[in-house]
Image (tube, rainbow, N blue to C red):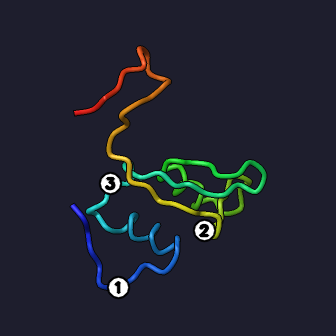
Amino acid sequence: STIASKSKLRNSEDVFNRIVWDNRFDQDEFVIRYMDRFTGIQEIPFTDFAARKADQQGEDWIPFHRVWYFTRVIRTVFSAERSGRELYLE
């Protein structure tokens, strides 16, 4: 279901905080894509990103201005890492 809001989300920090504080969202269903200065677009699970936000001085810290996408991933339908490389579609 789509969750509509009358107020617009202005930036990636607003989206991040909405996912963290709105209990209608499961943080494990989200991934974040961000621009790494050296390697280009990278993907990280939302929960890993949130843990890095808690340690803003560490070398793994990712500033919000580098976040490009928040993606909600409910179910992986293909994984080359899984044995048998099966396609999971209903």
Q: Position of residue 80 (x, y in %)?
A: 49, 25
Categorize mark 2 by other alpha carbons within 10 Å: few (<14), some (14-19), many (20+).
Answer: some
Residue beneath the point at 57% across and 63% down: 68
| Location of mark 1 (residue) | 7
Residue beneath the point at 35% across and 85% down: 7
Residue type marked 3: Asp
Q: Which mark is residue 64?
A: 2
Q: Secondary structure at mark 2?
A: helix
Residue beneath the point at 74% across and 54% down: 59
Q: Tell which residue pokes out farthest to the right in this image.
A: 38
Q: Which mark is residue 45?
A: none
Q: CA distance from mark 2 to mark 3?
A: 20 Å
- In this rendered view, identify the residue nearer to me: 9 or 28: 9
Q: Would you place residue 40 above or below residue 3 in this image?
A: above
- Left or right of 10? Residue 38 is right
Categorize mark 3 by other alpha carbons within 10 Å: few (<14), some (14-19), many (20+).
Answer: few
Marks 1,3: beta carbons within 8 A: no
Q: Which mark is residue 26?
A: 3
Q: Secondary structure at mark 3?
A: loop
Categorize mark 1 by other alpha carbons within 10 Å: few (<14), some (14-19), many (20+).
Answer: few
Residue type marked 1: Ser
Quadrant location of residue 78? top left
- In this rendered view, identify the residue nearer to me: 45 or 10: 10
The quarter of the rendered structure image containing the C terminus is top left
